[in-house]
Amino acid sequence: MQLLDSLSPLSPSLDGLLILLSVLTSAFTSAFGVGGGVLMIMALAQVMPAAALIPVHGMVQLGSNVGRTTMTWRHVDRRTLMVFVPGVIVGALVAAWLVIHLPAGVLELCIAAFVLFTCWGPGLPKRALGSVGVLVAGAVTTLLSSLVGASGPLVAAFIKQSQDGRLAKVATFSACMSLQHLTKIFVFGLAGFVFRDWLGLMIAMIAAGLVGTWLGLRLLHRLSDHRFDTLFKWALTLLALRLVWLGISRWAA
């Protein structure tokens, strides 16, 4: 318990729960291709200060996605990855200019709106999935990732639909997300976030995420995701509605 107490400004019990959550969400993304990052940020938003939410989430997701990419590297679509990179750079530069401080409550409302849209909004047209579409997606989703945290479902709409085979989808998605989360060191470093205050928790959650990634990849060929997709969508919706209430309360205070 003393070790957990030294990991972050949160309570030891919350640190322990977040480490377990990292195992579960990494396993979910590895098995089903997307979703774990959104579930993690929705959970973190319930207990973590708004200023630490996106940078901590980004560093944990960076570790998880790098691990997943390393384990599936031979399946990565290099061409898609190279098209995605310039957009990531542009999005990060714009984010560094925009991300200073958001009014209380706005971050929670933005995350909730984003999650509800990805759960229930319209799908993307096929013409948006070409090279230009992927480049634009890299820029827009990197910017959104720095503002609302988990842009995975939107990235997946571009990356996953262009790949044949589940391993190719998981590998290419993970590689693109690794690049996107890497930019948060630059963006939030410029914004003045002190990463060392949360370093212990981030390292523990990254290590736990690698365990989850290994477990999820073992399940990749064994599980059907139809029922999980439905349950996951409704779970996110309920968490998003709670976050709407929390955001409105903080904004109106």
Image: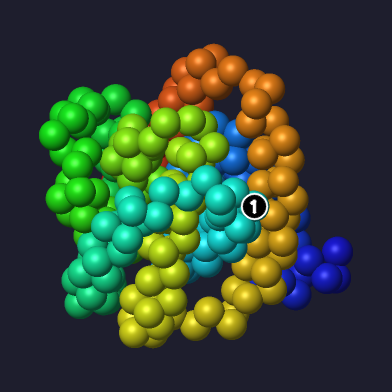
Instruction: Residue 217: give x, y in percent of width and height.
Output: 67, 39
The residue at the point 85 percent across, 70 percent down is 2
Place residue 220 in its image quadrant. top right
The foreground one among 162 and 197 is 162
The foreground one among 30 and 40 is 30
Instruction: Residue 128: give x, y in percent of width and height.
Output: 16, 38
Q: Image check: 129 left or right of 167?
A: left
Instruction: Residue 75: give x, y in percent of width and height.
Output: 52, 46
Q: Image check: 2 left or right of 119?
A: right
Above or below, 80 against 115 in this view is: below
Instruction: Residue 231: give x, y in percent of width and height.
Output: 52, 20
Quarter that holds the C terminus:
bottom left
The residue at the point 53 percent across, 79 percent down is 195
Q: Which residue is mark 1?
A: 71
Quarter that holds the N terminus:
bottom right
Q: Residue furthest top?
A: 227
Describe the element under mark 1 as helix, strand or loop: helix
Q: Residue furthest right?
A: 1
The foreground one among 33 and 231 is 33
**Circle 1: residue type:** Met
Q: Image check: 131 left or right of 17?
A: left
